[in-house]
Image (tube, grey):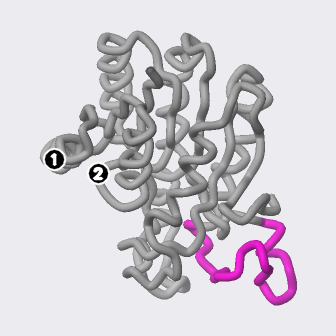
Amino acid sequence: MTTTLITGANKSLGFETARQLVALGHTVYVAARDPERGQRAADELGARFVQLDVTDDESVRAAAKHVLDEAGRLDVLVNNAGIPGEFKPHSEWTADDFQAVYDVNVFGAVRVLLEFIPLLKASDHPVVVNVSSGLGSIGTASKPDGQADDVPHWLAAPAYASSKAALNMLTAQYAYLYPELRINSADPGFTATDFNHHRGVQSIPEGAEIIVRLATVGPDGPTATYQSRDGVVPW
């Protein structure tokens, strides 16, 4: 049976991804910072709960030990935990505001990768999905009108967008360093979640579609790619 861990899985895209993967027969670990919310989500999904705060080294280390002790390996890792940062005029943002976003969206993913790669290497078919965003596409952001068919809902969000661009580079770098992994970035699209006050044009199941697709790639499936449900997204 495939053992999967999803960070930030107690709500929204993480929860829906867990729901779909449980339905496909995965043993899913719902990883969440809040024990009460995480356990409640796991119980509702028929999944397992592990407490994990991606901003805390010891928490990530303890979660990896918990999965190792229970399952002996990890087959699929979904780095889903992320934050948009404060909603305020960009002229008021400070370096500390950027740091807070990066600590979750970039350094959090690094902490999780560093601790769980040994467990993934114990799998016959290890897979990693980094949940990115179309806003992390430098190719799209650099176009004169700031928009493209592949990322139709582009907007300026320097901290969040640059953190997702950094996450995409982690995908490319780790795919090179660990060729035995299938590791890809997923762009869920403009999905109606609390991130955007539910203004997105896609449902949460629609947004989770590409995450699930990349979480279930075969051993000869893609790696070092950046994809949405509609196809490849420009780096």
Quadrant in which residue 58 is drawn:
top left
To which residue does mark 1 refer?
40
Q: Position of residue 102 (x, y in %)?
A: 52, 54
**Residue at left offset 83%, top offset 75%:** 142
Q: Position of residue 140 (x, y in %)?
A: 79, 73
Q: Which residues are magenta?
A: 138-160
Number of residues whose C-alpha sits closer than 10 Å to that of mark 2, classed few (under 14), some (14–19) or many (20 or more): many
Decide whether residue 28 is among the magenta residues. no
- Secondary structure, magenta segment, majority class: loop
Number of residues whose C-alpha sits closer than 10 Å to that of mark 1, classed few (under 14), some (14–19) or many (20 or more): some
Which amino acid type is shown beneath numbered disc 1? Arg
Q: Are marks 1 and 2 in contact (CB under 8 Å)?
A: yes
Q: CA distance from mark 1 to mark 2?
A: 8 Å
Helix, strand or loop at disc 1? helix
Furthest residue toward left: 36
As displayed, is residue 52 above or below residue 185? above
To which residue does mark 2 refer?
10
**Dividing the image into 4 quarters, which one contains the C terminus?**
bottom right
